[in-house]
Structures are given as C-alpha cells and as structure tokens.
Image: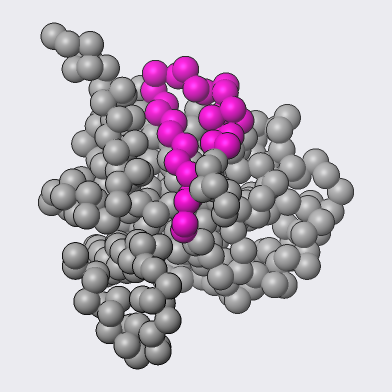
Amino acid sequence: MSGESRNPRRNLSRALTRIANADVSETLAQQGALPTGNLPRIGITGAPGAGKSSLIARLANLRKRADRKVAVLAIDPSSPVSQGSILGDRIRMDAIADDPDIFIRSIPSRRAHDGLADNTADLLNAMEGHGFGEIILETVGVGQAEYTIRTLVDTVVLILVPHSGDAIQAMKAGILEMADIYVVNKADLPGAELMAAEIEQVADHQSADGWTPPVIMTSRDDPNGFAALDEAITNHAAWRADHKDVATARHARARYQAQGLISRRIDEVLEAADADFLDQEPGALFDAIVARLRR
C-alpha cells in the first residue's frame, strides 16, 4: 500500500489545494455529482479580533466524539495586492493541530469579498465522504453586508466582544439578524453583561418556528461557556432537522455556487483584457464579456 493511500488526510489536503487554486475551467472539470451526505456545517463568523480561531479550537475539542471526527475550514484574509495570505489560523489553533480526530485547513480568501473564499462551496463539497461528523467553517472578519455564510452552513454562530455596542447598531440590518447563536466572547472584560443584554433584545425579535437564538458568554478561563455553546449547537441541529426545507437549502447553495463561478469567470476575462477591449462603450463591452465567458 502506498504512503499516500495510508494517509487520507494528505490526500484530502492535496485535493483541497487543487480546488483552491483552480480557475473556473479547472473547477468545472474537477466537479462531479453534488454530495448527498448532507454533512452538518457550523459557520463561525464575527469581526476581526473577536477570537474566532481560539474559540474554534476549544469548540472542536468539545464537538469531537468517540465516533465523530471534526473538520475545520478556516478562511484567512488575502492581501488585495499580492493575493497572498498569512494563514494564521493554523497558528492560533496550535493546541488541536496534531489531534487525529480534528482536521484543520486554512484557505486564502483571494478575490472573494463575502468573508469566504473563491471556491468555498467546492471545498465544502470535497470534504464530504472523508469520515467527518461535521465541518466548522470560519469566515474572514465580516461586517454588515457580508453574510453569505448563511447559505452554505446549517448553523451560524456570531462572535462579538464587549465595547462594540456601536457595531451592533450598524450590523442590525445585516449579519446580526441572521445568526442562530450569539456568543459574547472575552466575557471577562467590562461591558460583557451589557452587551449580552443588548443582544438578547435583538434575539427576542428573531424567534422563528420556535427557535430563539441563545446568547452565550465565553471567556478563556471558563469552560462552562464553551460547554453551553456546544449544547446550543447540538440543540439547534436537532431543531433544524425538524424545520429545514432540504430542497430550498439545496437550491440556495446551487445558486450561490453558480453565481460564484460566473463572477470568477468575469474577473478572469477582465484581468486578461487589453486596453482596446476595455475602451468599448458599456453595452458593447458587456456583449464582448458575455461572448468570452465560455472560451
């Protein structure tokens, strides 16, 4: 038996690398049938500095079971100039990096601006069928308009920290209102109780079919908060199993994937365009772009 076949993690890592680096034509060539396993997905999102990666390290340890391995897909921000990424989540998740029951992979966001990466849908699909019990997806730090993660996961956990009450007001029309679970992280800091109370007021207006988003407080030295978060995720999964419209969720993910492919292909066309191509009047330029999309 070859070394590669004895190391399924290495095989998966290489497959994810190919998907992450693929252009649109390569992505389409690599795609097979959509996965049917419906592996549960937990999305962790929040502003930069909220402590998402450290929280995920604690959460993954709790979510793994004797019969369940956990995969973590972390999206790291890319430089708008070089498109390079520090991929620092592997550093912040050092405590679980060698755990055989937890698989961690960081992917650069590249040109994506929705807190995810160019090929996130394909990456998540590729992680089906590798023995994982669920996937945790960490976004880049997000703001008011960047809540695409709602489409790709089953449970959205929004992480906030004290002293960002003004951010709550700015986010009420966007990401704050799409969370299934709220977490006030670094809850040992002043202002945490007040923030939790403010979020609870928002959550009270978001009850849907019997689910009211819980507000959980976590801090580095208090294991009870992380245990409460673990329980809340399990409870939401059970609730969602009875309320999820499978067809609607599937169609939303297919639409997101198609839109992403089209957007990336337009970027490829424009990046390859010369000055004469771009000097056309808008209508002609539009038609010329459409004509090149399938080349």
Residue 6 in which image quadrant:
top left
Report if residue 103 lies within the magenta region.
yes
Residue 167 in which image quadrant:
bottom right
When the figure is inspected, residue 244 is found, relative to residue 10, above or below; the finding is: below
Is residue 287 at least partly visible in the picture?
A: yes
When the figure is inspected, residue 90 is found, relative to residue 18, above or below; the finding is: above
Horizontally, residue 248 falls left or right of residue 212, namely left
Horizontally, residue 9 falls left or right of residue 150, namely left
Q: Position of residue 5 (x, y in %)?
A: 19, 17
User: Is 226 or 9 nearer to us in this picture?
Assistant: 9
Write the start and end of the magenta stretch as one range: 86-112
Horizontally, residue 142 falls left or right of residue 126, namely right
Which residue is found at the position 75% from the left and 44% from the top? 187
Report if residue 166 lies within the magenta region.
no
When the figure is inspected, residue 293 is found, relative to residue 9, above or below; the finding is: below
Q: Residue furthest front?
A: 276
